[in-house]
Amino acid sequence: MTVEGRSGTVHTNRLANETSPYLLQHGHNPVDWYPWGQEALNRAREENRPILLSVGYSACHWCHVMERESFEDEQIAELMNRWYVCVKVDREERPDIDHIYMSAVQMMTGQGGWPMTVFLTPDGKPFYGGTYYPPEDRYGRPGFPRILHAVAEAWENRRSEIEEQGGAMVANMRQMSEVDLPESPVTPDLLDRAFQKLRAGWDMRLGGFGGAPKFPQPMILDFLLRYAHRTKRAEPRNMAIFTLEKMAQGGIYDQLGGGFHRYSTDEYWLVPHFEKMLYDNAQLAQSYLHAYQATGDAFYRRIAEETLDYVRREMTAPEGGFYSAQDADSEGVEGKFFVWSQAEVEEVLGAEDALLFSRFYDVTPRGNWEHANILNATAPEESFARSLKMEPEELATRLAEMRHRLFERREQRIKPHRDEKVLTAWNGLMVAAFADAAAILGRDDYRDTAVANAEFVLDNLYENGRLWRTGKAEEEKKRRRGDKERGRGGDAEETNTQHRTPNAGFRVSPIPGFLEDYAYYADGLLRLYEATADWRWLDSAKELVDVMVELFADPEGGPFFSTPVDGEQLVERPRDLTDNATPAGNSVAVDVLLRLAVLTADQDYQRRAASILRQMNPLVAEHPSAFGRLLGAVDFYIGPVKELAVVGSMDDSATRALLAAARASYQPNMVVAVANPADTGHIELPLLQDRPMLDGKPTAYLCENYACKIPTTEPDQLAAQLIR
């Protein structure tokens, strides 16, 4: 499809009607793109053409490069259109397709990544693929036109060979996805072995694991904190705390605006890949909250709050949904929005303040990256203050004020593109982070943000008992809202205690929810119940879990499938088993099942989770770095689990004081049930049965290992019971 304009031919293709910002970015390529669907697959079969599948996501730097170099090139597009049915997929919308064909590319080439380019037979079997291809031979890679010619020639002349190769590839993929492991007992020894393997890869000098590039790995850090809590050993705790400190001091952390970039390209945590992902910031906010609980150090609280404040300010829609990502690039240059020259710093702060700021944040005339400066703390504030014979409080106050002034100046720059689609799974991760922060820090504004998101998702992405994967605000509504309201979603707003009607300006993409959507969002709702004592969130969490079991359980008893039983029939039905940048759907599902089993005493939840853990046991022991979130579930399963019931109204300050005391220390395996005695509708929860208030006061009941402590109305006594 083309439209003639004053400056020449303007192309549009089928992607111009999609909801995904990534697909919309390609909506004016001269490539005759299709979204994944029957229209493209039918055309490939009818014309007996191979499918050229291109997979990426909106914040992917090299995806943008390949688009500029190849997909916007008229001659390359002509080759693609002549020989192939071209299909573009947003990996964040369709993790099932991404998982299947990334597995194929890794089998073919030994590596993977995005952009991903895969050639398929008309019935979807992969036979050739790779990642980024340049427009001509360079970087030791064949040029994309040469690839297009070679694959088309092979399809024309060696089709039977290709069909056989594709069939063999699918057979191998199906065999690899089958989980045929004998169940084995899950014991504390598994956690010991996991720690020893992780310890061997730890960077004791700079924190983290391995060399460049270095990824945050919050699930592994959380496991280390859990393991330290279990064993009372200092070493795993120090490994986690040291890594969290180094990351927060480095350039991977946005020192002015809060929030973490995707990863560090070097081993020092200095030079990030500058995109910011919702899932990273959700998980890292929780890691810093846990570090604050474990240490009492306000530094970790500050990082958690700055990260969540960034999400409220930049990544929250006015209606309550959380956006997906911010690009690395602005004005076509990676990192431009975030870096500084020394002259700019001096202009904003003045000579005296700039001198102090530059010494602390590593700002020099030469720069520390491509003649510019990535802000990073050169030392902990306390030790830096001592070196200047300054009180730490004075330094902290001055630095905070200077950061604010530079942030205000930075707000005048052109911001990176924001991917404004709302993904149910990632919203589940973030609502869990806000709920935990509300409970741990006593922040009502964080509670309101979490509640607004839960209402929004359940009103807009949950229909007839089923979740949808994603949606996005209509462009027309955004224009009416106006540019000045772009960041308003971060402000605390009054929330309705009843579900609102669906938002007419929000367009749902008709992609059924995957396992991770159900598991992540059920986890978020469960944590929101514990933070608010509002029964609707527990009821909704249980409802989602029951649907999850119905749609994704393996009838043969293996781990959950990633796609629903009535979903689209692909070349294989994938399973999500390993924890990568985001946790595996199975890991979160097992964790939620175990927690719900404690709350509800439903032993079917317990049996199902335990069976998956017993099957996964050998893989976890051999490759612990690939199962960080599942290791947390193992820790919970082994126990002991603390069961805390608090009976009292949340409107009563004494009830809130008991809960604050419970959350003042790090208790990773604690389940909390709260009930107002006046609310008789949900007292059937086993943790709350036959537990009255003592002397008319809010009362806490703590049990562990099938034994209960003396009920107490005193926060100090409850805190003492928890740490014994």
Image (tube, grey):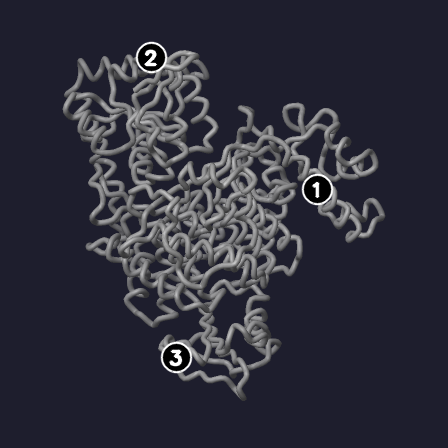
- Residue 318 spot, x, y in % from top left: 49, 48
Q: Which residue is mark 1?
A: 403
Query: What secondary structure is found at the residue carrying circle 3?
Result: loop
Cβ atoms at labels 2 and 3 below 8 Å apart: no
Residue shown at 35%/42% (left/top)? Answer: 507
Q: Residue furthest right?
A: 389
**Foreground residue among 546 and 102:** 546
Residue 377's place in the image compared with 382, above or below, is above
Q: Amino acid at mark 2?
A: Arg
Residue shown at 39%/79% (left/top)? Answer: 680
- Residue 446 spot, x, y in % from top left: 54, 57
Residue 106's place in the image compared with 403, above or below, is above
Observer-side mark, 3 or 1, equals: 3
Sequence order check, earlier mark of 3 and 1 = 1
393 left or right of 232 in image: right
| Category of crowding for the residue at label 1, using alpha-carbon neighbours closer than 10 angstroms: few (below 14), some (14–19), many (at least 20) | some
Sequence order check, earlier mark of 2 and 1 = 2
Q: Which residue is mark 2?
A: 146
Query: What secondary structure is found at the residue carrying circle 2?
Result: helix
Query: What secondary structure is found at the residue carrying circle 1?
Result: helix
Q: Amino acid at mark 3?
A: Thr
Cβ atoms at labels 2 and 1 below 8 Å apart: no
Q: Rounded to the nearest whole Å, what is the CA distance between mark 2 and mark 1?
A: 50 Å
Q: Amino acid at mark 1?
A: Arg
Q: Which residue is mark 3?
A: 680
Q: Rounded to the nearest whole Å, what is the CA distance between mark 3 and mark 1?
A: 50 Å
- Residue 159 spot, x, y in % from top left: 17, 19
Does the rendering let one see residue 112? Answer: no
560 left or right of 25 in image: left
How many dots with numbers?
A: 3
Q: Residue furthest bottom?
A: 695
Q: Quadrant of the N terminus?
A: top left
